[in-house]
Image (cartoon, rainbow, N blue to C red):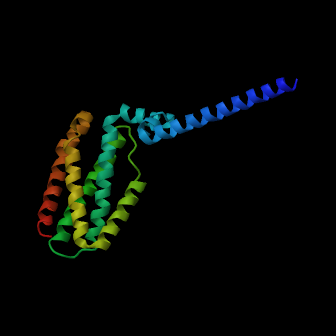
C-alpha cells in the first residue's frame, strides 16, 4: 500500500513539475517572441486590428489626418519661435509661413469633416509634444529652433511628394493645388533662412 501511495505521489509531483516547466517555457517563448517581433504581438491585439482595419478602409482620410498633424505641429513651433525672435528678416518670414500653415490646418479640418472623417484633436498629445520640443529647442538657441523648423519643412515637403497614390480624387486635388505649392514656398523660405544662420 505504501508503495502504491508513494508511486502515486511521485506521479502527481512529476506531472505538476512538468506542467510548471511547460508553463514557464510558454511564458519564456512569449517573452522572446515579444522581444524579437513586437509588431507581430501587437498585430494579434484585437483593438489594434480594429483600428488598423478602420484606417486602411479609409486610407485617404488617414493620410489627410497625417497631413493635419504635421501642419498643426508646424503652426505650434513656428508661432512659438516667431513670438520670441526679433531678428529681421527671420520674424517677418516666419509670420508669413505661420499664416500659410494656419490656412492649411483649417482647410484640412474642413475637408476631413466634409468627407465624413474626424480631424485629429487640436490639443492632442502630438501637439503638446511639439510645443515642448519647440520650447526645449529655443532654450538651446534661436539657431537651433530655426534649424528645427527648416528640417520639419523639408520633411513635410517630402511627405506631400510621396503620398499621391493613397489619396482619393478630391484629396489629390487638394494636395496638388493647395498643400504642395504652399509647402514648396515654406520649404524654400526656410532653406534661404538656413543659409543665413
Q: Is residue 45 left or right of residue 155?
A: right
Q: Is residue 20 left or right of residue 81?
A: right
Can residue 167 be seen by looking at this rendering?
Answer: no
- The picture places residue 89, in percent across and down from the top left corner, at 14, 71
Q: Say which quarter of the image contains residue 20.
A: top right
- The picture places residue 81, in percent across and down from the top left corner, at 27, 69
Q: Say which quadrant the C terminus sits in.
A: bottom left
- The picture places residue 166, in percent across and down from the top left corner, at 26, 35
Q: Is residue 123 left or right of residue 20?
A: left
At horizontal 33% and vertical 48% (from top left) the residue drawn is 109
- The picture places residue 191, in percent across and down from the top left corner, at 13, 60
Q: Say which quarter of the image contains residue 176.
A: top left
Position of 188 relative to 21 (above/below): below
Numbered circles on residues, count = 0
The foreground one among 197 and 39 is 39
Can residue 16 be seen by looking at this rendering?
Answer: yes
At horizontal 36% and vertical 63% (from top left) the residue drawn is 131
The foreground one among 130 and 140 is 140
Q: Residue furthest front?
A: 3
At horizontal 26% and vertical 67% (from top left) the residue drawn is 145
Q: Say which quadrant the N terminus sits in.
A: top right
The foreground one among 32 and 106 is 32
Amino acid at each position: 500500500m505504501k508503495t502504491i501511495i508513494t508511486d502515486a505521489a511521485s506521479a502527481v509531483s512529476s506531472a505538476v513539475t512538468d506542467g510548471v516547466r511547460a508553463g514557464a517555457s510558454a511564458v519564456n517563448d512569449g517573452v522572446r517572441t515579444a522581444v524579437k517581433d513586437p509588431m507581430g504581438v501587437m498585430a494579434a491585439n484585437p483593438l489594434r486590428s480594429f483600428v488598423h482595419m478602420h484606417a486602411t478602409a479609409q486610407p485617404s482620410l488617414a493620410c489627410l489626418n497625417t497631413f493635419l498633424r504635421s501642419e498643426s505641429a508646424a503652426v505650434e513651433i513656428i508661432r512659438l519661435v516667431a513670438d520670441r525672435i526679433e531678428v529681421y528678416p527671420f520674424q517677418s518670414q516666419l509670420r508669413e509661413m505661420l499664416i500659410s500653415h494656419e490656412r492649411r490646418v483649417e482647410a484640412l479640418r474642413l475637408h476631413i469633416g466634409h468627407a465624413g472623417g474626424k480631424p485629429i484633436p487640436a490639443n492632442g498629445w502630438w501637439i503638446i509634444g511639439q510645443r515642448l520640443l519647440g520650447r526645449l529647442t529655443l532654450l538651446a538657441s534661436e539657431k537651433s529652433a530655426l534649424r528645427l523648423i527648416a528640417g520639419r519643412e523639408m520633411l513635410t515637403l517630402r511627405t506631400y511628394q510621396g503620398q499621391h497614390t493613397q489619396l482619393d480624387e478630391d484629396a489629390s486635388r487638394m494636395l496638388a493645388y493647395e498643400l504642395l505649392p504652399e509647402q514648396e514656398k515654406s520649404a524654400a523660405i526656410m532653406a534661404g533662412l538656413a543659409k543665413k544662420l
